[in-house]
Amino acid sequence: MYKTLYLSLFLLFHVLWVNAGIFDITRYGARPDGVTICTRAIQQAINDCSKAGGGTILIPTGIFYTGTIYLKDRVTLYLDKGAVLSGSRDSADYPANSPQTLRCLDTHFPHGGPQRNFALIYAEGKEDISILGEGTINGNGDYSGWQRGDNAPNRPKLIFFISCRKVAVKNVSLVNSAFWMEDYLGCDGVEIEGIHVINHGNWNVDGIDIDSKNVIVRGCFIDSDDDAICLKSYIRDRPCENVTITNCVVASNCNAIKFGTPGYGGFKNITVTNCTVSACTIDQLRQREKKYPNITASPASESGVSLECVDGGKMDGITIDNITIHSTLTPLFIRLGNRHAKMITDTATHIPCLRNVIISNIIADGHSHRTSSITGFPGAYVENVQIHHIILDLDGGGSIAERNVSSVKENDEGYPSPEMFGQSLPASAFFIRHVNGIKIDDVWINLARNDARYAVVLDDVHFAYLRNLYIKNGDGKTRIIAPENIKMSSSEEVYLADGKIK
């Protein structure tokens, strides 16, 4: 009798709970002991929730050990305070996923080999899906079994959403993915807010990767060993577009804020505002060798902001405003290149394009001789760049031997990175090559040591307007940058303040 009564009450409570649209995974048999595999229980809760028309999957306080779970339409995964979704350390718990909506992933993503697309939380072609709450998702990427090398395959991402609509990820903490932490590919309408990301447990562990449209990332803290925020574009003629990144703190042992690679489809209408780039909480876990000359800061990101368009796509309409950059080797890196102008599936070669870029209100320090650079390649020009209201605090110390412009190789098919031109450039502040239309206004360059290099180098630059450029050398005296501080080679229509100098 008591057993029957207990069962009846349990079923009644369960029905009331489900009718409220809340599906507690512990009522499906999930155990919060951090040991019992809970994949089936969590997935059944998701399936029931979706069949009921949608609702919330509750992850209560405790540690729930799981393999891949698949989100479905109108399902919210909610992690209570003190809840931990802990990724399995067994690769058998991560089934391979072959995307159906973006078939290119099986042919050329990213290097022509088949992709198995492992992830802890996976969704494809779903609508109105969310991950919310005050809990933590831990990928256990620091587990020894996942330590397979920099570009090793068969490691699960933490979150991988493909071709989804109306996506929200808010307020959760994301820790130690075995690969990229978050990957939003081909999605439309993505809102990421208030998340806390720490990703230092493995090789090639980006903080967040976005190849989608109509995206906002705001109020996030992202601290990663590889790129912190990385925009990508994998599919020809389908740009990553209409993306806003604002009010974030990012840290990286690689590139803090980066567009590309790849950039096959290009980047359009992207805005990054009110962000701070800071030093990582962990110094070079991947043990990047420090044999480079003239590097004084540790830890240090490779670059603060990198705009890279090297795969035949078009980058157009980029705004970078009000960014503070600390502890970086190269503050700004803008690169138009010719790396992968023809993909496996292309019938013709695509010429990349990088134009209409505004960079303003930047305070940055730089701790190497890898100067900020804006470069195209022979026959392909970066176009219409505006840089204004910039303060650069740089180490200086460059020598006369580093002033040789002709020694800077083109490397037009090389992988884009600040070190692609070597460990020093002939300018202390800006190296500009193959650019058609650039305006630089109100720039203050503070050098800790005297620097024998030119302040600005213009090589094959057509129509440049430079105004209100000031430099303070190691002697502590501030001067207006004079023509002799600007090196010009194969350039024309260059104006300094009110006077044409060539």
Image: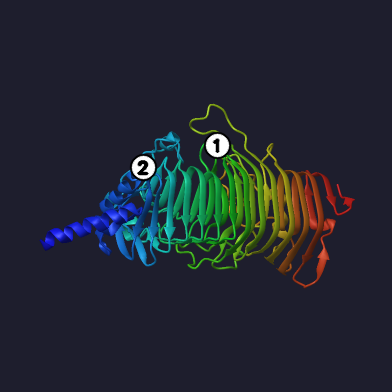
Q: According to the image, label 2 marks what residue?
A: 116
Spatial CA span between label 1 and label 2: 22 Å
**Above/below status of 493 relative to 387:** above
**Which label belongs to residue 108?**
none
Query: Can you name the residue that lies furthest to the top here?
Result: 347
In this view, the residue in front, 358 or 269, is: 269
Find out whether the residues at labels 1 and 2 contact each other: C-beta distance under 8 Å: no
Q: What residue is rendered at 73% in x and 67% in y?
A: 446
Q: Nearer the viewer, mark 1 or mark 2?
A: 1
Identified by mark 2, the residue type is Arg
Quarter occupied by residue 329: bottom right
Q: According to the image, label 1 marks what residue?
A: 238
In this view, the residue in front, 269 or 370, is: 269
The secondary structure type at the circle numbered 2 is loop
Say left or right for 176 vs 327: left
User: Residue 11, percent across and down?
Assistant: 22, 55
Quarter occupied by residue 7: bottom left
Disc 1 crowd rating (10 Å Cα; few below 14, some 14-19, many 20+) is some
User: Can see residue 427?
Assistant: no
Q: What residue is rendered at 36% in x and 64% in y?
A: 83
User: Can see residue 307?
Assistant: yes
**Above/below status of 102 relative to 130:** above
Identified by mark 1, the residue type is Arg
